[in-house]
């Protein structure tokens, strides 16, 4: 269980949203040119050179939709907006306006064909993670030589730039390979690496002030039509980043225990125990208490990251559509 305190008013609002089935799915928007993602949908406005990004309450896992989590989209969009604003002095970004808690109006940009990952700890369980590769015997990871004798969740000697491909099956890749394969030019890669490390270090510093360890993250960068490299998509959100509770990390690490975290793993575990989420055509419905608890954790993490009180927005998708139409006139 996370250390986020229970707020009865928050619990009531979350439960009410769930019972009314009023989560933001994006299915009721009638805007043109929808490009649906797992969580975030795009609506392109080429004449204005803009794209409207709508962050929904959809919860993905196992490459499919698992549930609709009340207020999750609002949390992700507003956390991103927070970090976009805080990092403007480090790198340009694509944000033009945030006319609604679930909406970002952004400049069009062509993303690089590489995911920019920064890591600070020896952890992770996916095929691209540093711990999965290290525990499998790899000592050269993304072109970086790693020492013997490291253990899971140990702090690395420094922040590492560890990009991955965007293939059907992503894989870790070195900076040398990125250039030799023609995925990026050397000068662009050098700039992106420098900026990603700067942004990550800045995020770590601010997170630490709020009792969090920023463990790792995935950045997306791209170019606008003028060739300016920008930070795009989402930044340091609970979906793109791993956060641990700072207060208990050292004690738990010394005992060989997993760090305290605030994430969606417990919901994924429920599906793994109750079905085969990779093979079953129809998945069981996630229990209300688990979905609402995940919402509570997202909201709590928003408040820890930003230091701001979460303001529940229940205006629905009609107001999202109005906000986008007004912002893209």
Image (cartoon, rainbow, N blue to C red):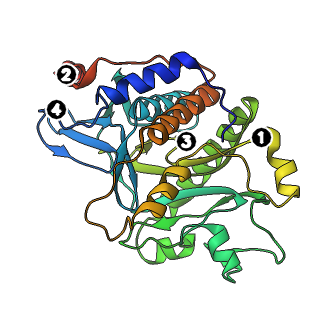
Q: Earlier in the sequence, mark 1 or mark 2?
A: 1
Label located before the other in sequence (3 or 4): 4
Residue at point 83% right, 56% down?
253
To which residue does mark 4 refer? 29
The quadrant where residue 163 appears: bottom right
The residues bearing labels 1 and 2 have C-alpha atoms spaced at a distance of 40 Å
Classify 10 Å Cα crowding around label 1: few (below 14), some (14-19), many (20 and above): some
Q: Which residue is mark 3?
A: 236
Mark 2 in CB contact with mark 4 (< 8 angstroms): no
Which numbered tag is attached to residue 318? 2
Task: State the residue in front, 144 or 43.
Answer: 43
Query: What residue lies at 48% left-to-right and 42% top-to-bottom?
Result: 290
Which numbered disc flags the more N-terminal residue, 2 or 4? 4
The N terminus sits in image quarter = top right
Residue underneath mark 1: 246
Determine the CA span between mark 4 and mark 1. Answer: 40 Å
Compared to 120, does 198 lie above or below? above
Could you tell me which secondary element the residue under label 2 belongs to?
helix
């Amino acid at each position: 269980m996370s250390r986020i305190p229970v707020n009865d008013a928050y619990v009531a609002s979350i439960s009410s949203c769930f019972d009314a089935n009023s989560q933001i799915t994006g299915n009721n928007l009638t805007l043109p040119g929808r490009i649906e993602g797992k969580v975030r949908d795009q609506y392109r406005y080429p004449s204005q050179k803009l794209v409207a990004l709508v962050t929904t309450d959809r919860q993905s896992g196992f490459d499919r939709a698992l549930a609709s989590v009340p207020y999750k989209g609002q949390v992700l969009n507003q956390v991103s907006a927070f970090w976009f604003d805080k990092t403007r002095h480090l790198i340009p970004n694509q944000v033009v306006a945030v006319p609604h808690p679930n909406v970002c109006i952004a400049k069009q940009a062509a993303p690089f064909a590489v995911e920019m990952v920064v890591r600070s700890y020896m952890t992770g369980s996916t095929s691209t993670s540093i711990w999965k590769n290290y525990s499998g015997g790899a000592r050269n990871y993304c072109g970086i030589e790693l020492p013997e004798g490291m253990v899971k969740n140990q702090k690395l000697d420094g922040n590492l730039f560890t990009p991955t491909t965007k293939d059907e099956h992503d894989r870790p890749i070195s900076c040398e390979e990125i250039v030799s394969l023609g995925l990026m030019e050397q000068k662009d890669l050098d700039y992106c690496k420098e900026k990603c490390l700067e942004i990550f270090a800045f995020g770590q510093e601010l997170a630490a002030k709020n009792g969090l360890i920023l463990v790792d993250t995935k950045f997306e960068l791209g170019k606008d039509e003028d060739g300016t490299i920008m930070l795009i998509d989402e930044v340091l959100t609970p979906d793109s980043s791993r956060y641990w509770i700072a207060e208990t990390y050292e004690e738990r690490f010394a005992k060989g225990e997993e760090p305290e975290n605030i994430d969606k793993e417990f919901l994924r575990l429920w599906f793994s125990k109750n079905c085969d989420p990779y093979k079953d055509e129809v998945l069981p419905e996630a229990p209300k208490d688990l979905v609402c608890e995940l919402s509570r954790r997202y909201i709590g993490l928003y408040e820890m990251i930003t230091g701001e009180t979460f303001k529940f927005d229940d205006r629905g998708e009609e107001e999202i559509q109005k906000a986008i139409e007004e912002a893209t006139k």
